[in-house]
Image (cartoon, grey):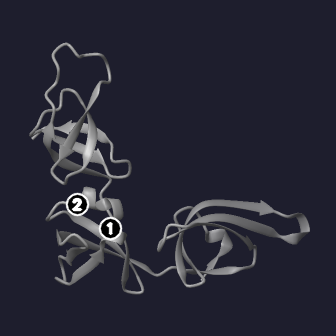
Amino acid sequence: MLGVTDLKKGTLITVGGVPYRVTDYAQKQMGRGGSIVNVKMKSLLDGRVLDKTFKGAEKVEQANVENRAVQYLYSDGTIFFFMDQTTFEQFEVSATIVDDGKDFLQEGMDVNLQLFDNNVINVELPKNVNLKVTYTEPAVKGDTTSNVQKDATVETGLNIKVPIFINTGDVVSIDTATGAYRERVKV
């Protein structure tokens, strides 16, 4: 059990049997009445955000969320298959849990799975991934104004905006949080 003053940003707790991650924390001192703690927390199951106020003496249960390092194997379109490299245990994860992460997954990629009560609740991708550009229009000579961007398709099928100097066959680094181009990778 955790005291409410232990609820710092990023702490995992369970409220009503649902795991949450604390995203915002504020403590107020109330004269004779002790202190209260206001937290904003995000559900790890469905992403809902909840505001909750705790009194100074309350206790909350720490969430038992397990992180497992796994390797992405393949997908059949609705189910994604991952394997723990030490135990060789395989996990089947539905496309709804993988969500937009499917645009960044490559066979053989190392990722982390978050498990709650032995059920996968999240696929945690690396901050950046390197993907090969499979198609982009060639640059137009003379179109060199600053910050000109064009459409490109990468090997996973994701469409992104890239600078005009990127060509088909180049490898680019993409931010998995925003889906935005970061830089060209030297191969």
**The quadrant where residue 54 appears:** bottom right
Residue 105: assigned label: 2
Q: Which one is in front, 161 or 20?
A: 161
Using residue 31 as the reference point, say whether residue 37 is left or right of it.
left
Q: Check the picture and name the quadrant holding the N terminus.
A: bottom right
Q: Earlier in the sequence, mark 1 or mark 2?
A: 1
Residue that numbered label 1 is attached to: 98
Estimate the x, y position of residue 106 in percent, counting from the top left.
17, 60
For this orientation, the residue located farthest to the top is: 142
Residue at image coords 27%, 42%: 160
**The quadrant where residue 161 appears:** top left
- The reply to whether dot 1 and dot 2 touch (C-beta < 8 Å) is yes
Q: Check the picture and name the quadrant holding the C terminus.
A: top left
- Element under label 2? loop
Amino acid type, callout 2: Leu
Taking 31 as reference, is 88 above or below it? below
Residue at image coords 26%, 65%: 111
- Element under label 1? helix
Q: Label 1 crowding class (10 Å Cα cut-off): few <14, some 14-19, many 20+?
A: many
Estimate the x, y position of residue 104 in percent, counting from the top left.
25, 56
